[in-house]
Amino acid sequence: MSDFTETLDAEARKCALNMIALWAARQLGKSGEDADEFARDFIADNASSEQQQHLFDKLSRLLREKGTGTKDILQKVNEFSAVAQACFSSFKNDCP
């Protein structure tokens, strides 16, 4: 895998984390700057983790008390990951 492709994969992951974090913030009743701050902190805490299970477990703990079930969380994680990968896949297809 080229350095360029690895960079795109990292950017896609960061994009997905951002979407997941903002969704989670809304589930927790946050908006505006509070939601942005939550997203920044969430990304900083999870950017280095390659394990989706770690992310899923953390979201489950955060959102359980708000009534968001594991099925909903998994659906959103998969949805946002697919969107982010699709956004960056056209660049990857052009990689040498």
Image (spheres, helix red, strand yellow):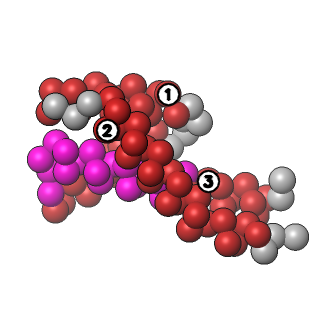
Q: Given the current orientation, which residue lies at the most extreme right position?
A: 96
Task: State which quarter of the image contains the C terminus.
Answer: bottom right
Badge 1 crowding class, 10 Å Cα cut-off, few under 14, some 14 to 19, many 20 or more, is: few
Secondary element at image label 2: helix
Viewer-proximal residue, 38 or 77?
77
14 on left or right of 72 = right
Q: Nearer the viewer, mark 2 or mark 1?
A: 2
Q: Earlier in the sequence, mark 2 or mark 1?
A: 1
**Tags 2 and 3 touching, CB below 8 Å:** no
Q: Which amino acid is tagged 1?
A: Gln
Secondary element at image label 3: helix
Q: Which amino acid is tagged 2?
A: Asp
On screen, residue 60 above or below 39: above
**Tags 1 and 3 touching, CB below 8 Å:** no
How far across and how far down the image is residue 50, in percent? 59, 36
Q: Which amino acid is tagged 3?
A: Ala
Q: Earlier in the sequence, mark 2 or mark 3?
A: 3
Our reading of the magenta stretch's main secondary structure is helix
How much space separates mark 2 and mark 1, taking CA atoms?
Answer: 15 Å
**Disc ID at residue 53:** 1
How far across and how far down the image is residue 34, in percent? 17, 53
For the point 79% across and 58% down, the residue is 3
82 on left or right of 66 = right
How much space separates mark 1 and mark 3, taking CA atoms?
Answer: 17 Å
Residue annotated with mark 3: 10
On screen, residue 83 above or below 57: below
Q: Earlier in the sequence, mark 1 or mark 3?
A: 3
How much space separates mark 2 and mark 3, taking CA atoms?
Answer: 25 Å
Badge 3 crowding class, 10 Å Cα cut-off, few under 14, some 14 to 19, many 20 or more, is: some
